[in-house]
Amino acid sequence: MPRITCTRLLAWDAAHRIPRHESKCAALHGHRYTAEITCAAEALDDRGRVIDFGVVKERVGKFIDERWDHTAILMKGDPDPVAQAVAASNAEKGRPVYWLDGPPSAELLAAELGRVAGELLASSGVTVVKIRLWETPNAYADWEP
Ligand SMILES: [Zn+2]
């Protein structure tokens, strides 16, 4: 039996910086991120789908809208004063910073989204089999469980 997957794209705007980066990515800056969320299921449903694309948008898109869009995604314990300043300022505006366990590289954002999307979609009987996370139009990272 062929393997069928489906992929939903979601996009958001966020700032980040990479602590200890060798050059310009150490400075706080922003991206228009795009994630490709690929799901697989044991079988297609009676409407011929892995999962309704709208369910991925509703659940994972809600997480992205609430936690990642129009804020900063920073490393827990980031020693740069800008990190603490942005955290305080964004919290006042109702856009708390999202603290990641490691540096907010495309790779680790892909891994975080893979973990979160997997949890949010598990009750629909699907597995998130791949996240392709575009940091710029020219650069992406892939995560697979
Ligand atoms: Zn960047």
Image: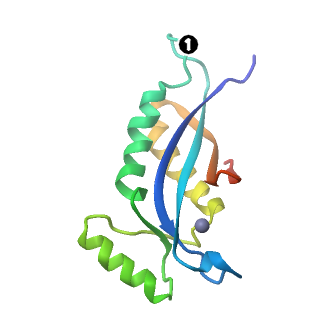
* Residue at 57% in and 46% down: 35
Quarter of the displayed picture in which ligand 1 can be seen: bottom right
Q: Disc 1 designates what residue? A: 48
Q: Position of residue 126 (x, y in %)?
A: 54, 32
Q: Secondary structure at mark 1?
A: loop
- Near-viewer residue (25 or 126): 25
Does 58 sit above or below residue 112?
above
* Residue at 53% in and 54% down: 32
- Near-viewer residue (104 or 31): 31
Q: Position of residue 71 (x, y in %)?
A: 39, 64
- Near-viewer residue (32 or 126): 32
Q: Amino acid at mark 1?
A: Gly
Q: Position of residue 40 (x, y in %)?
A: 62, 30
Is the C-beta of the residue carrying label 1 under 8 Å from the nearest atom of ligand 1? no
* Residue at 47% in and 24% down: 52
Does 111 sit above or below residue 118?
below
Label 1 environment density (alpha carbons within 10 Å; few <14, some 14–19, many ≥20): few
